[in-house]
Image (cartoon, rainbow, N blue to C red):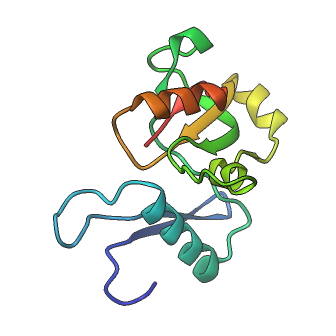
Amino acid sequence: FPKGVPWIHYHGAYKGIIINLVWPGKDLTFGVDSVGTISASLVTYASIQALQPDLIINAGTAGGFKEKGAAIGDVFLVSHVAFHDRRIPIPVFDLYGVGLRQTYSTPNLLKALNLKTGKLSTGDSLDMSPHDEASIAANDATVKDM
């Protein structure tokens, strides 16, 4: 990794599979966990370049919406991801900003672990403004993370 970044890397092997666990660490100025989409994307990109993995799993916590079938303690395998707080009010750029993307399909994993599936809406704010709430609804999100 680049010199001076706070990123943490653990690695090992399990049944012949090399496993790398990487997380953004703590902000060097404020001492809080580096959260949000920017730190996540930077550490993911650098990890891909340095480690060249065959598979990337983004594991984390999210809030679920009861009206979409989510309950406390549920584990979801995300089917789609979108941003709820990237607002670019220019035609076509507005769609780019939302960035709705389908994730890699893993039906065997879904079945073997008996997981729920749903769409995820992500952003860089912990609270939920009325605009974010409308965007999350438009994204048809079942779960929301930061």
As drawn, which residue projects farthest toward the left?
A: 30
Q: Nearer the viewer, residue 103 or 95?
A: 95
Query: Residue 43: x and y, percent?
Result: 49, 70
Tally of marks: 0
> Which quadrant of the rendered structure holds the C terminus?
top left
Query: Residue 132: x and y, percent?
Result: 48, 34
Q: Which residue is drawn at 64% across and 47% down?
A: 98
Q: In this view, does 44 lie above or below 121?
A: below
Query: Residue 77: x and y, percent?
Result: 66, 34
Q: In this view, does 83 lie above or below 96?
A: above
Give residue 143's quadrant in the image: top right
Q: Residue at x 61, y 14 (%)?
A: 68
Give residue 105's quadrant in the image: top right
Q: Which residue is drawn at 66% across and 43% down?
A: 81
Q: Which of 20 and 97 is in front in this view?
A: 97
Q: Which residue is drawn at 44% across and 17% down?
A: 72
Q: In this view, does 10 lie above or below 49?
A: above
Image side of residue 112 versus residue 59, left or right = right
Give residue 109's quadrant in the image: top right
Q: In this view, does 86 lie above or below 41?
A: above
As drawn, which residue projects farthest toward the front?
A: 90
